[in-house]
Amino acid sequence: MLLYFCVLILIMKFTKKRFFDLLWVVAIAIVIIPSSRAWLLKVISFSPSIENVSERIPISSYDWKLKGLNTSDVNFETLKNKVVFVNFWATWCPGCVAEKPSIQALYNDYKNKVVFLTVTNETKEVVAAYFQKKGYNLPAYNMITREPKELSTENIPTSFVINKKGLIVIKSGRADWNTDKIRDFLDSLLAD
């Protein structure tokens, strides 16, 4: 944040010609400095889109086992008939870092109603250090077996919301998950 205030002060001191030079330097800094990218991505995050009923894909296999990094292991088979939030992420991913506070806020209010699975390929130690630094208490997992093909993704962050019938009702990249739209939608899924 201090960096941004310093940049603003410098901008005020520069002439119009130098302003554009400085603007390029700031743009490059945002691209190079990971914390800058995360901040920018957080600012421009939107609520995820809800899939049309006709486009909802069913989970074909619940044969997926997860190793708990800060919680118990999970067999996806036991999550049938529950609302499940799955988030694939990493500590080094700016988009993941940007959306994590909104996921934590949602988890704080829905942890006893919705099953949250935050899945990473990073070690227990890396995740623990990151969560401690940020004050997160989300349940984190490593995959023991491959995810169902419907949840397969090459990009992170990617999140899925699965309804009680086993249908993917939301699939989204980086998003602001702590919105009234998402909360109302989760409430409707829980009421079904």
Image (cartoon, rainbow, N blue to C red):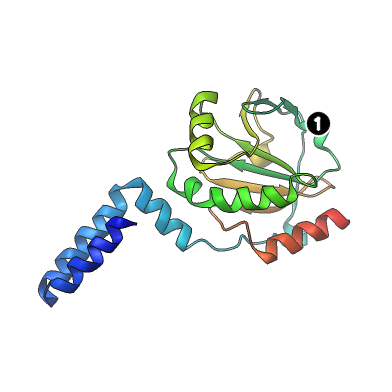
Quarter of the figure that contains the N terminus = bottom left
To which residue does mark 1 refer? 77
Residue 8 appears left or right of 34 = left
Q: Residue at 60% across / 62% down in the picture?
A: 47
In depth, the one of 152 and 114 nearer the eye is: 114
Q: Identity of the amino acid at label 1? A: Glu
Judge by depth and name the residue closer to the eye, 68 or 66: 68
Q: Quadrant of the C terminus?
A: bottom right
Q: Position of residue 15 (x, y in %)?
A: 11, 75
* Residue 89 horizontal/vertical position (percent): 54, 40
Q: What residue is drawn where x is 24% and y is 55%?
A: 28
**Up/down of 64 relative to 39, above or below:** above
Indicate left or right for 128 with 52 as reference: left
Image vertical order of residue 158 relative to residue 4, above or below: above
Considering every residue shown, the one lying at the far bottom of the view is 16
**Residue at 11% across, 70% down:** 18
Residue 50 screen position, x and y as percent: 69, 61
Instruction: Say whether residue 40 is left or right of residue 101.
Output: left
Q: Secondary structure at mark 1?
A: helix
